[in-house]
Image: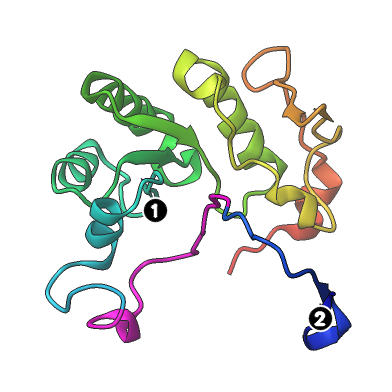
Amino acid sequence: MPRRHAGGIELARSRVVATPFLVGTSGWIYQHWKGLFYPPKLAGRRWLVRHSNIPIYADESVSRAAEVTREILGGSATGVSIKTARTGFTHSQRIHHLCEGLGVEVVIGNQIDGQIGSVCNAAFGAAYEATSRRAGELSNFLDMRDDLLTEPLVIEDGTVLVRQGAGLGIDIDEDKLRHYRHDG
């Protein structure tokens, strides 16, 4: 006979099979977690890397190859999220090559970029096999009301299409640029 649970949901009296699932967090340095979730003298991200079987990516904290080396070899991350808005193409390439040499997983991310930043990330990610075959964090521009491109980015079947043409293949709407320009 079924029994009622909070909210009126019926629960059958039968065996429940546990299934694996992933837990995500938007950060790992929460002071109130020290001593409760991880040891007081161990950095939170290192604890997560050591005690979980999910990838932990370094992102904003690693904008140069030396910082990537410190995070990966120090055990604070198992992969790197390259964000071209923070690292530019030159340092992004250096980070990518370092990770490739170390055998470290690399993904492409963004920093709440508009479409221009997302185009930069998509173009960079498409240039390398390792990043072109993994999911990337490129869709934050969808939350924005307006953008500076004359033609919006195209997403087909969950894929951001890389533009054809010289450079990044984009054109800036000069009127919108004047409207949003801030010289202060």
Which secondary structure class fits the magenta region best? loop
Label 2 crowd (10 A; few <14 / some 14-19 / many >=20): few
143 or 184, which lies in front? 143
Q: Is residue 86 above or below residue 128?
A: below
- Sooner in the amino-acid sequence: mark 2 or mark 1: 2
Q: Quadrant of residue 69?
A: top left
Residue identified by numbered label 2 = 3
Q: Residue, x 84% and y 36% (percent of image)? A: 152
Q: Residue, x 76% and y 36% (percent of image)? A: 172
Q: Which residues are magenta?
A: 19-36
Q: Quadrant of the C terminus?
A: bottom right
Residue identified by numbered label 1 = 60
Q: Residue, x 65% and y 60% (percent of image)? A: 15
Q: Quadrant of residue 106?
A: top left
Q: Which element carries disc 1, helix, strand or loop?
A: loop
> In x, y percent, where is residue 44?
27, 67
Can residue 128 be seen here? The reply is no
Q: Which element carries disc 2, helix, strand or loop?
A: strand
Single out the mark in the foreground, 2 or 1. 2
Q: Quadrant of residue 14?
A: bottom right
Q: Amino acid at mark 1?
A: Glu
Alpha carbons under labels 2 and 1: distance apart: 49 Å
Q: Amino acid at mark 2?
A: Arg
Residue pushed farthest front? 1
Q: Which mark is residue 177?
A: none
Q: Quadrant of the N terminus?
A: bottom right
Position of 141 with respect to 70 (left or right) is: right
